Structures are given as C-alpha cells and as structure tokens.
Amino acid sequence: MVNTEWGNQTSISEFILLGFGNLLELQLLLFLLFLVIYMVTMAGNILIVTLVVTDQHLHTPMYFFLGNLSCLETCYSSAILPRMLASLLTGDRTISFRICIIQYYFFGFLLGVECCLLSVTSYDRYLAICKPLHYATRMNGRLCLQLAAGSWINGLLVSSTMTSLMSQLSFCGPNEVDHFLCDFTPVKKLSCSDTSLMDIVAFLMAAIFTLPPFLLMLTSYICIITTILRVPSTTGRQKAFSTCSSHLIVVTTFYGTLMIVYMLPDTDTLRVLNKVFSIFYTVLTPMVNPLIYSPRNKEVKEALRRAINAFLTLTGIETGVKFKGLCTWGKSPAWGMQIAIGEEWWISAE
C-alpha cells in the first residue's frame, strides 16, 4: 500500500483505529451511549451559543468567553465522535492516512484552544472576584477580543506545526493505532522514522504555549481562593465561591485527565487506563460544560426564559405577564393550555 500523494514518504495508506474493538459484545451499547452524549453535547452547546449571541443581557466578558468555549466544544466533539460512532455501528475501524492527519490537526487545534480559553476564563474570574472595582475597565471589549483571538491563534500555531511534522513521518510497519482517535503518541509510535525532532518540538510547544496558560490559571485560582477565605461572612464566601466553582469543576476534570494521559509513561499496563481517561477530556467535558454552567447560573436561566417567551409569542401564543417569584405565566386561548416558566416549568391542561 503506497501513498504517492504524500511524496512517497509513507508506505501505509490507512490505519486501523482499535478503539474499543476488544469489547465486541458491547459495541451496540457503546454506540447508543456515545450517540446520546453527542446529541446532548451538540444541543447544550448550540443552545448556549445561541443565547449568548441573541440575548443582550449576556453580552458581558464572562458570557463572551463561555460562548467561545461552547462553540469550541461543538467543533471538538464533531471532530471525534462522528468517526467513532460510524466505527461502532459498522465495525469498520479503518481510517486513511490523510483523514487521520486531518483529524489529528483539528483535535490538536481545538485542544490547544480549550487550554487557553479555560485559562482566560479563570483570569476573568480572578479580576471579577479579586479586583472588582477595576474589572469593568480592565476586562473591556478590546481585551476580550484579544484574549479570545489569541487563544484560537495559539491553538492554530501549535497544531499546524505538529501536524506538519507528523505528515512527514514514514509509516512502514504495523498500522494499528491503539486508540479511538488519531492522537500524537499512538500514531508516532507506529512510525519507522526518527521522531526525536518531533519529540523536541512537542516539548517546546508544550513549554511555550501550554504551560503558561496552565500557570496563569493556577495562579488565578490561588488568588481567588485566598480572596474568598478573607471574606468575613459565610454567606459572602459562599456567594463568591459560587461564581467560580462551576469553572473550577470543568478545569479540574479537563486538566486532571489531560495530565494523566500525557504525563504518565506509555506502558501496556497503563494504555487501557489512558484510553479511559482520554474519554473524559475528549467526550465528557464537552457534554458537561453546558450542564455545569447553565443550571447554576441565574443569568442563563433568565435568558432561556426570555427566549421561550419570545418563541411562544412568535408561534401565536398570547402571553400575559404575572410575576410571582421568578415565574412567568402565559396562556394560550387556542389550545386551552397554561404554561409556567420558573425554577420549574410545566404544561397542564385546564
């Protein structure tokens, strides 16, 4: 199998993603599980992006970064899960060399962007909690755009560099990738070329583009926790911590599993464990982001209520507003239905 399109640099034209091939009796169950995860991920993140774009009350730095993160998670999941679902459904685990390189490019690109965006959002929370009087002037629209653009450019530079080096490797031996996606380590192991240069570049890229965002995030949360502990009242501490606890959960899950996968030695004993932990930052984190942020956030819930009210109005339902706590009531003379939207919302026939 000779691939002439890559300048005769590789003798293998396709790889086999082993994925979860050793669990043949669970293929259908895994397909249904990952299909539900993909649908929830897409629906939740698209909803967040839509609310942030359309609702002016969410046009703030915090929600600007959250919208970027949700847009990223939508693309991130789409770069991994459709191929995995097709493999689980059909049993065809082959992937061409070109498609493998393309998947690695987008995976690396979006992974790098997420590292930076999580760091940027932690810096935003640091300013909001530790420097509240200077927050509005420091975190202005221009800085928000620069931080977001820098995150996307950072991921683009890292992924372009690493993908360019990987595309020049020669593959002339086994073509079985012991993973469910084309990741750096499992693909590099199959190469019969000298990968020392690629290892050096990967180390430098991590030191220059990944370590600083991680240190910024770590420093931000040390300052945040220190500031919260100085708040005299228990209620004040709880309120301050609630503004960043959701982000801390996401960061801990993402970075914790990411460091386990890439920092532990690549041995046969740990290979299965690494594959399991990879699911956390590639599949589960994009799904739980909207689930963690939205239900805990009053502004997002209010934006969702306004969106539902606007939808009801556009569909011809006459709405009358009667405030009772956080509930908004609407009545439809056409169907004789009463709709309540509040901390809980339901439909009950009269």
Image: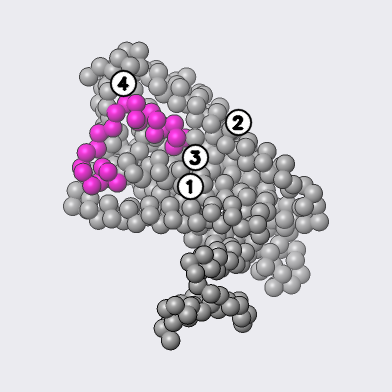
At which x and y percent is residue 268?
Answer: 31, 38
Q: Residue at x 81, y 56 (%)?
A: 133
Q: In the rendered structure, which amino acid carries the disc numbered 3?
A: Leu
Badge 4 marks a residue whose secondary structure is loop
Distance, label 4 to label 1, CA atoms, is 31 Å
Q: Is 56 included in the stretch rendered in magenta?
A: no
Left or right? Give the position of 235 relative to 100: right
Badge 1 marks a residue whose secondary structure is helix
Q: In the current view of this chain or complex, which residue is farthest to the left?
A: 25
Distance, label 2 to label 3, CA atoms, is 15 Å
Q: In the rendered structure, which amino acid carries the disc numbered 2?
A: Ile
Distance, label 4 to label 2, CA atoms, is 29 Å
Q: In the rendered structure, which amino acid carries the disc numbered 4?
A: Phe
Q: Quadrant of the N terminus?
A: top left
Magenta stretch in the rendered image: 85-108
Q: Is residue 58 above or below residue 323?
A: above
Q: Nearer the viewer, mark 3 or mark 1?
A: 1
- Asked if labels 3 and 2 touch by Cβ distance under 8 angstroms, the answer is no
Dot 2, crowdedness within 10 Å: few (<14), some or many (≥20)?
few
Label 2 sits on residue: 208
Label 3 sits on residue: 111
Q: Residue at x 46, y 43 (%)?
A: 75
Secondary structure that dominates the magenta span:
helix
Q: Nearer the viewer, residue 252 or 289?
A: 289
Q: Is 107 included in the stretch rendered in magenta?
A: yes
Q: Is residue 174 above or below residue 52?
A: above
Label 4 sits on residue: 171
Badge 3 marks a residue whose secondary structure is helix
The mark nearer the N terminus, 4 or 1, is 1
Label 1 sits on residue: 73
